[in-house]
C-alpha cells in the first residue's frame, strides 16, 4: 500500500495545476504556430487546468509522481509551415520542453528561497523541479499516449507506424501494468532525470550561488 506524506501530495497537486496545463497549452501553442488552429477553436489554448486535466492521469501523478493530461487535439492536415510528420513531432516535443522550462523556473525559485532562508519553500520548489523533469522524461517514452510516441513516428517508416497503431491498445495495457505493478522504469527514469537536474543546477549556478 502506498504511503505518501501530505506534503508530497500538496507538492504534486501544485505540479498538477501548473505544469500540466502549461504542458498541454504548449502543444496547442506550437500547433497553432505551425498553422493548426484546432486547439484554439476547441478552447484548449488556455492555462485553465480544468480544460486539460485527465482523471486517471491526475490520480496517477498524485500517487506515483508521473501522469498525463487530456491530449490537445491536433490536425496535421492544417500544418503549413512544415510537413505533417515533422509538425506532429515538433508539437509533441513542445510538452516535455515546457516541463524542462518549468523545472528551470522552479530551480531558480528554490535557490532564491535557500538564499532567503525559506527552507520549506526551498523543499517545495526543488521537489517541483524534480517532478517536472520526471514528467519531461516520462512523456518522452515512445509509447501511446505519451509524447515520445509521436516523436518516434517521425523517424519510423509508414509500415512501422501502422503496426504500432494497430497494436496500440495492447502496448498501452502492458505499459500501464509495468507502471502500476513494477518499478522497472524507476532506475532509467531517475537516471535521465538526474542528468537533466545536474544540467539545470550547473546552468543556474553560472549566475546564482547555491
Image (spheres, rainbow, N blue to C red):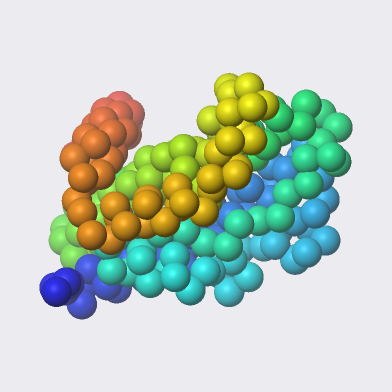
Residue ID at (78%, 26%): 83
- Asked whether 32 or 158 is in front, the reply is 158
Residue 38: x and y in percent read: 80, 54
Q: Nearer the viewer, residue 154 or 99?
A: 154
Above or below 34: residue 127: below
Quadrant of the rendering where the C terminus is positioned: top left
Q: Residue furthest bottom?
A: 6
Can the viewer see residue 94 in this picture? no
Query: Closest to the observer: 179 or 167?
Result: 167
Report the residue at 14% width, 74% height from top: 1
Name the residue: 73% across, 43% down. Answer: 31
Q: Position of residue 124 (x, y in %)?
A: 26, 62
**Horizontal placement of 146 versus 201: left or right?**
right
Name the residue nearer the viewer: 200 or 99: 99
How many marks the image carries: the answer is 0
Residue 194 lies, in percent from the top left, at 23, 36
Q: Is residue 24 above or below residue 205?
A: below
Horizontal and vertical percent position of residue 170 = 47, 51
Q: Residue at x 54, y 30 (%)?
A: 152
Amino acid at each position: 500500500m502506498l504511503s505518501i506524506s501530505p506534503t508530497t501530495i500538496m507538492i504534486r497537486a501544485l505540479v498538477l495545476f501548473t505544469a500540466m496545463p502549461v504542458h498541454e497549452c504548449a502543444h496547442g501553442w506550437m500547433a497553432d504556430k505551425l498553422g493548426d488552429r484546432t486547439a484554439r477553436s476547441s478552447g484548449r489554448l488556455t492555462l485553465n487546468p480544468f480544460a486539460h486535466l485527465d482523471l486517471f492521469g491526475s490520480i496517477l501523478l498524485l500517487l506515483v509522481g508521473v501522469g498525463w493530461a487530456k491530449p490537445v487535439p491536433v490536425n496535421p492536415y492544417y500544418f503549413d509551415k512544415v510537413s505533417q510528420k515533422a509538425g506532429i513531432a515538433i508539437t509533441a516535443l513542445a510538452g516535455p520542453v515546457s516541463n524542462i522550462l518549468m523545472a528551470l523556473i522552479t530551480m531558480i525559485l528554490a535557490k532564491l528561497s535557500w538564499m532567503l532562508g525559506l527552507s520549506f519553500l526551498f523543499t517545495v520548489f526543488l521537489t517541483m523541479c524534480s517532478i517536472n523533469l520526471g514528467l519531461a522524461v516520462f512523456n518522452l517514452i515512445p509509447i501511446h499516449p505519451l509524447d515520445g510516441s509521436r516523436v518516434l513516428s517521425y523517424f519510423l517508416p509508414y509500415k512501422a507506424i501502422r503496426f504500432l497503431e494497430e497494436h496500440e491498445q495492447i502496448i498501452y495495457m502492458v505499459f500501464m501494468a509495468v507502471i502500476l505493478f513494477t518499478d522497472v522504469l524507476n532506475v532509467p527514469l531517475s537516471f535521465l532525470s538526474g542528468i537533466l537536474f545536474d544540467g539545470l543546477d550547473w546552468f543556474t549556478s553560472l549566475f546564482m550561488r547555491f
